[in-house]
Amino acid sequence: PELLILDELGYKKLNPNVVDEFFEIISRRYEKASTIITSNKSFKEWVEIFNYYVLAYAIIDRIVHHCNVVIIQGESFRMKDKKLKKDMVKSIS
């Protein structure tokens, strides 16, 4: 596809059998097609996701070469919504 969106990368560790395939996907798309990746993990933590330093570094290298990194800090929107609902229930009771 012209655009591949990978949401929540790092939510779960990748199976070692899948890591090689993930690298192949990123490599084949490198400088050819757009990819959006969302993650709550820093690049330093990606070694934990991929279970292999060299492969994690190779993936990061290809991703960041022509990218715009957007870092959003703060509380999760889902957590804010949950807190708001909890506060609303408290005010009603």
Image (cartoon, grey):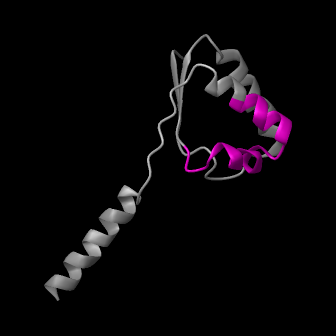
**Tally of marks:** 0
Give x and y (percent) for residue 47. 76, 46
The residue lying furthest to the bottom in this view is 93
Name the image quarter holding residue 84. Answer: bottom left
Q: Is residue 17 left or right of residue 8?
A: right
Q: Main secondary structure of the magenta part?
A: helix
Query: What residue is rendered at 26% in x and 71% in y?
Result: 85
| The residue stretch that appears in magenta | 39-60
Q: Quadrant of the N terminus?
A: top right
**27 to the left or right of 90:** right
Note whether 29 is above or below 84 in the view shown.
above
Task: Please give the name of the residue rendered at 69% of the width and 50% of the height, measured from the top-left corner.
Answer: 45
On the image, the x and y values in percent for residue 90 come to 22, 84
Within the image, what quadrant is residue 67 found in? top right
In this orientation, which residue lies closer to the viewer: 28 or 42? 42
Q: Quadrant of residue 63?
A: top right
Q: Nearer the viewer, residue 64 or 34?
A: 64
In the rendered image, residue 40 lying in the magenta stretch gets the answer: yes
